Image: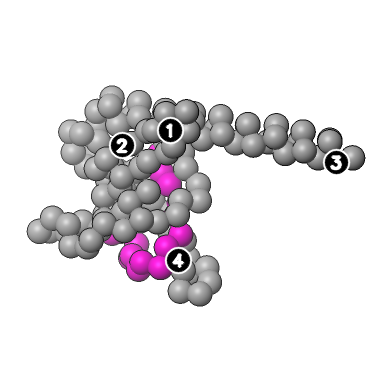
Amino acid sequence: MVVKRTGLSGFVQKPQIVNWMDFCRNGIAFVTNLKFNLGNKLCIMLTIDDVKQEIIEDIIGVVKNTKRVQDGQYRYGIEFDFEANDYMKSDVVRNGLMSIEESLKNIIQRLGKRNKSAAKNSS
């Protein structure tokens, strides 16, 4: 996932790759060494590689939660801002976010089955 902080004059920060921890169609949590404040608006590019590569660009989100976790790392909770612009209000965005959410659920289910199978075979 790539994150850029937005400002009055456009993007005020170079794009940075961050590690996402949690996702749903309404928001995302990620960990990074970047520092954001509550209320900062971010421009996010979501990517997921599964059976097919899914990319959704220019997702606008607002920092709603921040917590220092360890070694200069911060965990942020971001709420997507569906009122930010026409693109964020579009079915393209909503359908794309739902598609990523479904892909992640499928990955988790496959991993769960694989782990159960491995545990069963090691018994």
Q: Position of residue 23 (x, y in %)?
A: 47, 43
Q: Name the residue tied to disc 4.
A: 74
Nearer to us: label 4 or label 1: 1
Q: Position of residue 104 (x, y in %)?
A: 51, 35
Q: Name the residue tied to disc 2.
A: 56
Asked whether disc 1 touches disc 2, contact meaning CB atoms under 8 Å apart, the reply is: yes
> How far apart are the two marked residues, 3 and 2, measured between alpha carbons?
40 Å
| Amino acid beneath label 1 | Ile
Residue name at image x 28 percent, y 27 percent: 92
Within the magenta stretch, is there residue 108? Answer: no
Residue name at image x 77 percent, y 38 percent: 118
Residue at the extreme bottom: 71
Q: Earlier in the sequence, mark 4 or mark 2?
A: 2
The label number, if any, that marks residue 100 in the structure image: 1
Nearer to us: label 4 or label 3: 3
Q: Quadrant of residue 82?
A: top left
